[in-house]
Image (cartoon, rainbow, N blue to C red):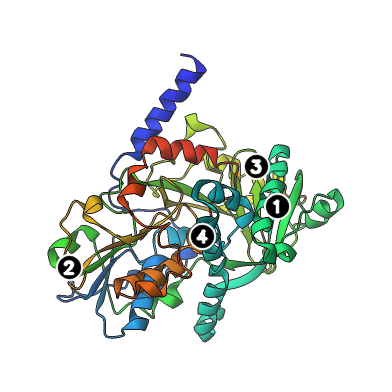
Amino acid sequence: MSSSKQDQSIFDTLAARLDKDPGTPVNDPTESFWQVPRLPIADARSEQLPEVADVVVIGSGITGISTSLHLLRQDHSLKIVMLEARSAISGATGRNGGHIKAVPWADYYALKEEFGKESAMKITKFRLSHLDALVGEADALGEAGKVGLVRRVEGVSGVYDEEGWKLAKVKLQSFLEDFPEERGRWTICEDQAELNQLGLANAYGFIPRNANSWAGGSLHSVYKSPVRSAYVERADIYQARYPLHQRIHCTLAAGLEREMWPLRGQMTVQSVPEAFPRVGGTRSWSAIWARGFDYITQSPAEDGSLYLGGGFLQGGLEKDQDLGSTDDSTLSAQCLEHLEAVPSKAFVHGTGAKVEKKWTGIMGFTGDGLPMVDRVRSHVSGREECEPNVGGEWIAAGWDGYGMVHCWLAGKALAAMVTGHEDEVRDWFPKDEFACSKERLDKMSAEGALERFFGSLTSENKR
């Protein structure tokens, strides 16, 4: 078989994998670093399913938490039931890479080309706004928000590919032309002395930003605020119990199998040698390769452990088992082979780093790279729509691995839409861009998603 035929065969296999119903989460997921020790809230559940609910939220991650919290801020009398297939915050939110990081220079160019300048700017501003929003939420929690939930650090994007570095400079310039107010916050550094001083090995250059943030991977403190009644159960029971209520899907939703698909991500915690600088309280990194990128944060504690994830497709398409996979009970051998070598390849003092903890998590991707935050119409669900004042279905999902700069404020916007205050969010929320219109969905397919996805692997446009 020729190489082109082999590639097409692999492509067809992957497309068929994406077309499958993702089903429900597996029962025995790998243990995430962020979920140890296991906190009591993880297993909180009602003794029995409540008989009455105003709103049913499916999914207990950051999107479900934010939506519930903002609904209660509007109307504290609302009875909200949260359904979760496993333990609380056990999905992507409890398995993330630790960044709340928008990198507009890396993805604005593509957004503008595909969606136009106005939409690209609105999406970019929305992503950038999450830094202050989440820092503000942590501050509002008082003492509970001071335990590593959020901290500001410098974000450093090191580029380890010559052509990729040339493209990075073009992208940064494109971004700054339309966002002149950001000029003082982003710089280009390619001096080898600076690279060595920063501890980057083999990089062609790096782009730092003087304000970034890092999340400690846990929202258990926030979780206590919105959840009035949480029940951990298979989510497919909700239709019979709550047929005419507001139902919000904060997860992969039935009816969108061809437009939204899963991808398994790999994370590690790695110990570092004594010579490795302990700068986790002030810095995080991204390592951008010829294909794809990795995301890296560091513990602010004396141990200086690296929280390092990524490695997607670094071993080639023929080894891939992550596209379309919802099995986070197993690890990704291809990603791990790459991630184990990253510290020694990317950092001056990285040789000798050792993987101490490894786990996987499932992310939701869409056919055009943008989330879906909208009312679920009949062209999606196949069910007859009820009158808005009676109830309805909603969705907030498909973050493309970029959830921490989408989810929180998307939950706030969705809460406003559910309660009939849609006009209040139009100034700051990309409602039209994230809508589940039939026109948008009709353009999506597994084949198109793969073509677009592979074309973006050289960009740092997922988190």
Q: Is residue 212 above or below residue 166?
A: below
Q: Earlier in the sequence, mark 3 or mark 4?
A: 4
Residue 296 % position (x, y):
62, 55
Per the model, the C-alpha gap separating discs 3 and 4 is 25 Å
Q: Residue at x 83, y 56 (%)?
A: 197
Residue 8 % position (x, y):
44, 24
Per the model, the C-alpha gap separating discs 4 and 1 is 18 Å
Q: What amino acid does circle 4 point to? A: Ile
Q: Nearer the viewer, mark 2 or mark 3?
A: 2
Does the CB distance between marks 2 and 1 fall below 8 Å? no
Disc 2 designates what residue? 387
Q: Residue furthest top?
A: 1
Q: Earlier in the sequence, mark 2 or mark 1?
A: 1
Residue 289 numbered mark, or none: 3
Q: What amino acid does circle 2 point to? A: Glu
Circle 2 packing at 10 Å, graded few (<14), some (14-19), many (20+), is few
Q: Nearer the viewer, mark 3 or mark 4?
A: 4
Residue 189 is left or right of residue 36, and the answer is: right
Per the model, the C-alpha gap separating discs 2 and 1 is 48 Å
Residue 101 % position (x, y):
58, 61
Residue 39 % position (x, y):
42, 72
Label 3: which secondary element: loop
Label 2: which secondary element: loop
Q: What amino acid does circle 3 point to? A: Trp
Residue 123 numbered mark, or none: 4
Disc 1 designates what residue? 173
Label 1: which secondary element: helix
Circle 1 packing at 10 Å, graded few (<14), some (14-19), many (20+), is some
Q: Residue at x 86, y 52 (%)?
A: 193
Identify the image quadrant of residue 58: bottom left
Per the model, the C-alpha gap separating discs 4 and 2 is 30 Å
Q: Earlier in the sequence, mark 2 or mark 3?
A: 3
